[in-house]
Image: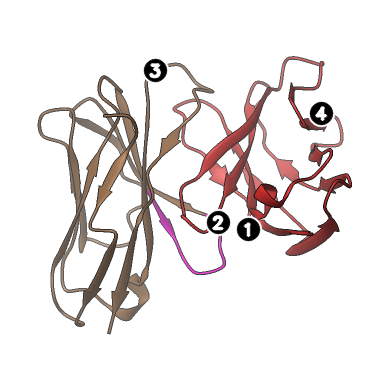
Amino acid sequence: GAGVSQSPRYKVAKRGQDVALRCDPISGHVSLFWYQQALGQGPEFLTYFQNEAQLDKSGLPSDRFFAERPEGSVSTLKIQRTQQEDSAVYLCASSLWLREGSPLHFGNGTRLTVT
Amino acid sequence: AQTVTQSQPEMSVQEAETVTLSCTYDTSESNYYLFWYKQPPSRQMILVIRQEAYKQQNATENRFSVNFQKAAKSFSLKISDSQLGDTAMYFCALNFGNEKLTFGTGTRLTIIP
């Protein structure tokens, strides 16, 4: 596609529910990142994939957060038993190159609200 | 650990004027990359400009330019001839190694018509 696509754009979940957020990166992009952006803050790194391999998940805040990219393209970020502190915008980004300094292309994000 | 600090939470400037957004950072790496991203209300982060730390020449992209002071660990963004479409959140970011970006807390820029 022309850009990184994320769905849904908005998600409201009751506390305790599970949610799944989808990211469709730019075709052919090797690297894929998930970021969490709390209101009024900068994005915080969650996890990173290179093709289907999850190379860094050091930013995932708890074991309730799980990400996968089974075929090296579409990725899903799953949050189990959502809590109010999970309310944030979740941004996905992809990049073509493997070398450092590659610019990231971001999607429009999913705004998650946990009530 | 690397950190990025943006000390100006909000700024406003008249249309057509020049504005400078500040950013300082800290890293122990010798080779790294610095970025400015723009985030309009649509939430999509858009790359404005990129600087490689080993290059002394300041990067420029049309009306956008940076003042990169490596010794001082400073990376400011200058927007010339500001336009209404420049209204957005601006984030300074740093990365090295495996491309993980570290962002600052952002500066909300408003261009006044």
Q: Which mark is residue A42?
A: 2
Which chain did the renderer colour brown?
Answer: A
Residue B33 x/y as whole percent: 62, 27
Q: Which residue is mark 1?
A: B105
| Residue type marked 1 | Thr
Residue nearer the viewer, B107 or B42? B42
Q: Which residue is mark 4?
A: B70
Residue A24 x/y as whole percent: 23, 38
Disc 3 and disc 4 in contact, CB within 8 angstroms: no
| Residue type marked 2 | Gly
Q: Which residue is mark 3?
A: A98
Same subunit under labels 2 and 1? Answer: no
> Which one is closest to the eye, mark 4 or mark 1?
1
Q: CA distance from mark 4 to mark 1?
A: 21 Å
Residue nearer the viewer, B109 or A58? B109
Disc 4 and disc 2 in contact, CB within 8 angstroms: no
Disc 2 and disc 1 in contact, CB within 8 angstroms: yes
